[in-house]
């Protein structure tokens, strides 16, 4: 017998499993059954090319034994099994890449009642330690000639033991020595109801020996008890049934089974494709984004079946990455059963299915937006950010995706979000472009000086509040109209203003030079602009420079961003410049000139959402000016 240490993360996980997840403990059985079913799927799949795997009677099944006397519950399968090396890795030394995040999530207090996390993070097996104080696993790899197997055993205390054994049949037995207070899981009805609730759709039979009363054939009226093997699950491939035969309840349960989600899905998409490709798809849009959807190890894609045989649990070739939240099943009649991962990647049939599924999902979203708007809002809140990636990655469908986007805008005051189409339809006659501003909220945007000229012209401005918006939408063209940031340097929306701008440039040329010189360490240039109405000045990024929002985001991501100097734009209509110029003309060396210029720059910083360069000096100057004005 050899003794091994669990990996640190596994230890932490076990500790938390035992101590924090008190509700829904029964999911441990679902996890064991699901592992057993996966093991059978793999064995069956490999048996297509390796007949040595079909050694026994060939009927795949999962068996549950409940031994009340010994307090032992066993889940047994005749699937692929594990070698010694594999079992050491799988059940002890490998921590899945999401484990750290999972542990963090478990530690946060509202997570206790989120058992769906167990499945999402692939820590299913360990959940059995919620109900067992010792677990023994016996396993023998399928396709092996001898009976050599391996025994794994642990009390979940930080170590596990490994021993070589003989095992008569291929596959795996997971033997739970139940805690005294968890003995209820040995009751037949308890097991039945858990299987029915969580595992009814498992394709392989889940069987159990149950006691039945029978009437004696010899002596009428005399009853006796017999043990009989009974299949507990209905095994229906729900996606192959006719839509009219499936209740919403059944759809929901199947979803929960495949997604490990405890909430009902938001939308069910069930259809059969005929023609160039024959397949059935049962797809789901979850109502809530799974915890780990942004992690690298998030498994993408629906399950792939070929003529009812599971080929893969997650087939990412069936779906565009920006629809990776979709869960479900695709069952194809055209693909060969022994299709490999490599073949899938360049397969024409798969490509056809992917296109078809993508179209169907986008069409469904469009329909939802038009007919079930509230539902669509829910979807958009959870997955809108991911969907937007499609603008960048799916050139051929970018119009359709763009039509699914929703924005706050300066015209969405009553709370209703706007689409690009709404925007274009209510554009002013002389307006040529679609304008947007980056801001966290409508309120924040409305305070921005960058909007002054737009307000005056009554041009609508969209509010980008997702970080990804700037990336996927800058330079985007919708119905021939370019999307443009209100902070970009080359905004000129008013011809009249243009004239005033030119005039100011001539009149105040010398003053501008002075400002430029005074602020040369902080800014790139000073110029008059037509974007302001009430504010005297603002800071803008130069054309070709990085959008300030993107700059902020990159900094937040820890990337080095070279310091970019901005342009100080002045409002030619603001009376301040006439006064300032007057002072300047009178006395080019006036001591207040520099202080005023510094104040101007500080104001621009404040308007941009930054702090004045030297807050103490800023307030001192302001107070000085105030007291002088009051004295007069
Ligand atoms: P997951 O199933 O999400 O990968 P688990 O902790 O439940 O996570 O299982 C870890 C690994 O142990 C599985 O990926 C699989 O390789 C192996 N395993 C678990 N149960 C079985 C089984 N019944 N037969 C074969 N392998 C199994």
Image (tube, rainbow, N blue to C red):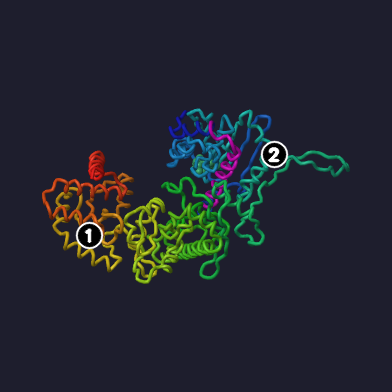
The residue located at (34%, 69%) in the rendering is: 432
**Residue 40 relative to residue 457: left or right:** right
Magenta stretch bounds: 19-45
Task: State whether label 1 is within 8 Å of ligand 1.
Answer: no
Residue 602: % across, % down: 25, 47
Above or below, 111 against 588 in this view is above
Helix, strand or loop at disc 2? Answer: helix
The answer for how far apart the CA atoms under marks 1 and 2 are is: 82 Å
Locate the C terminus by quadrant.
top left
| Magenta-drawn stretch, dominant element (helix, strand or loop) | helix
Quadrant of res 503: bottom left
Helix, strand or loop at disc 1? Answer: strand
Which of pointers 1 and 2 lies earlier in the amino acid sequence? 2
Residue under label 1, please give it. 528
**Residue 298 relative to residue 548: left or right:** right
Residue under label 2, please give it. 188
The residue located at (50%, 35%) in the rendering is: 109
Residue 144 visible, this orientation: no
Residue 456: % across, % down: 35, 62
Residue 536: % across, % down: 26, 54
Residue 196 visible, this orientation: yes
Residue closest to the far front: 632
């Amino acid at each position: 017998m050899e003794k091994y240490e669990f990996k640190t993360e596994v230890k932490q996980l076990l500790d938390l499993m035992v101590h924090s997840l008190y509700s829904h403990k029964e999911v441990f059985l679902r996890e064991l059954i699901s592992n057993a079913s996966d093991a059978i799927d793999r064995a069956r799949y490999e048996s297509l090319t390796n007949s040595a795997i079909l050694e026994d009677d060939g009927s795949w099944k999962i068996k549950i034994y409940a031994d009340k006397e010994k307090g032992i519950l066993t889940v047994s399968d005749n699937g692929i099994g594990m070698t010694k090396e594999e079992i050491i890795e799988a059940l002890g030394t490998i921590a899945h890449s999401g484990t750290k995040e999972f542990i963090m999530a478990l530690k946060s207090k509202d997570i206790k009642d989120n058992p769906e996390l167990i499945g999402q993070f692939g820590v299913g097996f360990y959940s059995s330690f919620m109900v067992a104080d010792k677990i023994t696993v016996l396993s023998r790899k399928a396709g092996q000639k001898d009976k050599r197997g391996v025994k794994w055993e642990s009390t979940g205390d930080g170590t596990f033991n490994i021993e070589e054994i003989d095992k008569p049949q291929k596959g795996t037995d997971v033997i739970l020595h139940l805690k005294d207070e968890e003995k209820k899981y040995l009751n037949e009805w308890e097991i039945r109801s858990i299987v029915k609730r969580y595992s009814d759709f498992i394709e392989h039979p889940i069987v159990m020996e149950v006691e039945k009363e029978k009437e004696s054939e010899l002596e009428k009226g005399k009853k006796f008890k017999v043990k009989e093997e009974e299949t507990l699950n209905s095994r229906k491939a729900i996606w192959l049934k006719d839509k009219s035969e499936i209740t919403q309840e059944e759809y929901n349960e199947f979803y929960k089974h495949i997604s490990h989600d405890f909430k009902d899905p938001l939308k069910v998409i069930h259809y059969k494709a005929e023609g160039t490709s024959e397949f059935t798809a049962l797809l789901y849009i979850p109502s809530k984004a799974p915890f780990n959807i942004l992690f690298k190890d998030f498994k993408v894609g629906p399950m792939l079946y070929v003529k009812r045989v599971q080929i893969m649990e997650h087939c990412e070739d069936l779906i565009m990455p920006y629809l990776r939240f979709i869960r479900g099943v695709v069952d194809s009649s055209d693909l060969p059963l022994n299709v490999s991962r490599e073949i899938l990647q360049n397969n024409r049939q798969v490509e056809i299915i992917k296109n078809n599924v993508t179209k169907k999902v986008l069409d469904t979203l469009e329909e939802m937006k038009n007919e079930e708007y509230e539902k669509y809002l829910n979807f958009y809140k959870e997955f809108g950010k991911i969907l937007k990636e499609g603008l960048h990655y799916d050139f051929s469908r970018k119009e359709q995706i763009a039509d699914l986007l929703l924005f706050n805008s300066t015209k969405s005051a009553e709370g209703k979000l706007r689409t690009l189409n709404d925007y274009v339809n209510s554009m002013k006659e002389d307006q040529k472009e679609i304008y947007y501003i980056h801001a966290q909220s409508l309120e924040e945007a409305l305070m921005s000086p960058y909007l002054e000229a737009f307000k005056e012209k009554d041009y609508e401005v969209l509010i980008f509040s997702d970080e990804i918006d700037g990336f996927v939408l800058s330079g985007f063209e919708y119905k021939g109209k370019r999307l443009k940031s209100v902070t970009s340097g080359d905004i000129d929306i008013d011809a009249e203003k243009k004239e005033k701008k030119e005039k100011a440039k001539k009149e105040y040329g010398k003053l501008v030079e002075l400002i430029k010189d005074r602020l040369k360490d902080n800014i790139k240039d000073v110029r008059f602009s037509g974007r302001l109405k009430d504010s005297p000045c603002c800071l803008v990024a130069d054309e070709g420079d990085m959008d300030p929002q993107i700059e902020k985001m990159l900094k937040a991501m820890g990337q080095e961003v070279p310091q970019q100097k901005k342009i100080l734009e002045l409002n030619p209509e603001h009376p301040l410049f006439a006064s300032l110029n007057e002072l300047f003309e009178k006395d080019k060396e006036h001591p207040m000139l520099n202080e005023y210029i510094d104040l101007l720059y500080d104001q621009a910083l404040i308007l941009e959402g930054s702090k004045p360069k030297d807050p103490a000096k800023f307030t001192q100057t302001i107070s000085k000016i105030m007291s002088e004005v009051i004295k007069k």
